[in-house]
Amino acid sequence: MNLLRLRAMVSYQDLLVGLVLLVFFFGAKRLPELAGSLGKSMKEFKKAVSGDGEDPERAGLPATTRACGGCATPLEADWTHCPRCGTPAPPKT
Ligand SMILES: [Zn+2]
């Protein structure tokens, strides 16, 4: 119990030291900027992963009438394979 508490305290102090070092290196003014750009790039990364810049389900309208036979992911008209599971897309109707 005592050991566990000590370790928790040490890790907390390490975190604090890390934060101080971060502020020291980047400057207190640039820190929010840094966090902001990090969040922005995370957002864009998620966007890129989820598909063609927009999530059709979130947009509320289906991007296409086709859907993957394997995982039911909506497929763009010019896609030949499902980006999620790799199943060949059904032929155009
Ligand atoms: Zn699929």
Image: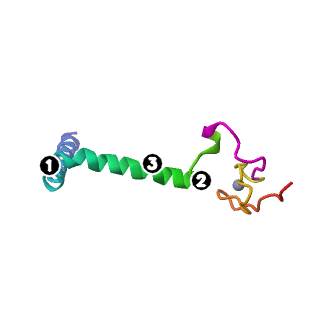
Q: Dividing the image into four equal quarters, which quarter contains ligand 1? A: bottom right
Q: Residue furthest right?
A: 93
Nearest to N terminus: mark 2 or mark 1: 1
Under mark 2, the amino acid is: Gly
SS class, disc 2? loop
Q: x, y (%) of residue 21?
A: 15, 53
- Of labels 2 and 3, earlier in sequence is 3
Q: Residue 51 carries which label?
A: 2
Question: Is residue 63 covered in magenta?
Answer: yes
Residues at discs 2 and 1 in contact (Cβ within 8 Å): no
Q: How crowded is mark 2: few (under 14 residues within 10 Å), some or many (20 or more)?
A: some
- Taking 29 as reference, is 81 left or right? right
Ligand 1: does it lie within 8 Å of the C-beta at label 3?
no
Task: Indicate which label's residue lies in the foreground, 2 or 1.
Answer: 2
In this view, the mark in front (3 or 1): 3
Q: Give the residue at mark 3.
A: 43
* Image point (68%, 39%), residue name: 61
Q: Name the residue under label 1.
A: 20
| Residue at the spot 60% in from the left edge and 39% down from the top edge | 58
Give the magenta part as a residue range.
58-68
- Left or right of residue 6: residue 75: right
